[in-house]
Amino acid sequence: MSHLLVTGGAGFIGANFVHYWETQHPGDTITVLDVLTYAGNRANLAGARAAFIQGDIRDTALVEGLLGDRNIDTIVHFAAESHVDRSIHGPAAFIDTNVLGTLSLLTAARSVWLSGEAKPHRFHHVSTDEVYGSLGPDDPAFSETTAYAPNSPYSASKAASDHLVRAWHHTYGLAVTTSNCSNNYGPFQFPEKLIPLFLINALHGRPLPIYGDGMQIRDWLHVEDHCRGIEAVLHKGRVGETYCIGGGAELPNITVIDTLCAAVDAAFAADRTLATRFPEAAAAQGRPTASLKITVTDRPGHDRRYAIDETRARDELGYAPARDFTTGFAATLAWYLGNESWWRGVLDGSYRDWVATNYNVR
Ligand code: NAD
Ligand code: DAU
């Protein structure tokens, strides 16, 4: 039986991880530590048994107390500022949370787990493929040996946190693992990221703002496959190692967007009630959703291509994504259509301010 502390567990991937873990490992206990920024949402944890603590990972004393009082033996660290566009507009928060927040967690973990007689423990750090920078069209995919070359304030802050985690292992002997994974999609994703933003814009008949030429490539990973990958690292990963986790679905943005538009059109054609529920949608007015596509100024420093070589995760952990993009996307569309109250709740909150002020949402 394990006792997990899941940081950022009210965010997109963290919440999916809590639900996944509770299903797979019903004997374990989970404590979620989340400060509830604009991206954190208690509703994401509806139905979960996990204890919820609203607090900041930068509060080292709080974390030390939780680790000791709850006999925590495993930290799964998701908490972060996670959106590249926000990091371009306001980088300081990314350094505060992603770098100083990770330092605080490492400090607490070292003090509780390694002072005196060392306790069995694991610190798993959830990171991103963006730390490796941008690939040319013919470059080999990122692997665990690719040199770090972060290009955005977000990826620079995640790279810094990866280095801290590595150093706490080599210097102090903290039992760490790190996973660097590709673009996730699925339930509970905050509608500032490409797929939920475009889905919700499409349902409102709002423009779909494509950055630059739309030919940037990402490797799309269903969030449940990411959770399975983290589970595999926790159970079979070597301490001190990093593992790249991908979806095996390298796609240009424009392909993702065209898939989304066609899927929305097909959903409206198959279910007449959608036109009543979403009368502003192009699909409700006899126009193709693709007519909402517009081209906008490119993201500054926009990485061109990400791709993951997951040989190590496959060979050492037996990891392989279970869902291809077609299946995963269809399930995601169905989830957003079936959980309108969830995303309306999100829209009623801080998202409104973001809509009003951000150039990429119209
Ligand atoms: P998210 O923005 O949806 O959620 C982040 C969560 O962290 C929120 O619940 C927020 O309230 C919480 N949080 C932020 N600052 C905090 C603090 N100081 N103390 C406690 N909680 C705090 O992010 P996500 O998309 O779920 O990403 C989770 C992790 O996975 C991040 O570390 C991110 O870098 C990494 N990652 C994400 C993706 C992706 O595609 N979304 C891909 C690879 C890696
Ligand atoms: O690769 C992993 C990373 O994936 C994670 O570490 C990040 O936390 C996560 O946000 C994601 O970063 P991206 O920048 O790739 O994701 P985003 O959804 O913001 O954008 C995906 C692609 O779509 C990217 O090339 C930019 C483009 N885009 C995005 C938005 C929001 C658009 O063309 N228009 C948009 O409005």
Image: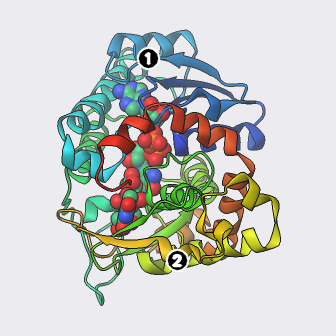
- Residue 50 spot, x, y in % from top left: 67, 25
Residue drawn at point x = 49 percent, y = 49 percent: 191
Residue found at the far bottom of this picture: 138
Query: Mark 1: which amino acid?
Result: Gly
The residue nearer to you, when weighing 321 against 234, is: 321
- Residue 18 spot, x, y in % from top left: 64, 37
Q: In this rendering, is residue 186 above or below 296? A: above
Side of 302 relative to 115 (left or right) = left
Task: Say how the picture is coloured.
Answer: rainbow
Query: Mark 2: which amino acid?
Result: Ala
Ligand 1, seen in the image, is in the quarter at top left
Q: In this rendering, is residue 5 above or below 16? A: above
Q: In this rendering, is residue 132 above or below 118? A: below
Q: In this rendering, is residue 277 above or below 65? A: below
Where, by quadrant of the figure, is residue 167 drawn? top left
**Mark 1 Cβ and ligand 1 under 8 Å apart:** yes
Residue drawn at point x = 82 percent, y = 66 percent: 271
**Residue for badge 2:** 290
CA distance for labels 2 and 1: 42 Å
**Image depth: mark 2 or mark 1 in front:** 2
- Residue 276 spot, x, y in % from top left: 75, 56
Where, by quadrant of the figure, is residue 357 drawn? top left
Residue drawn at point x = 31 percent, y = 61 percent: 130
Quadrant for the C terminus, please.
Answer: bottom left
**Residue for badge 1:** 55
Q: Check disc 2: other Cα within 10 Å, few if <14, some if 14-19, many if 20+.
A: many
Secondary structure at badge 1 equals loop
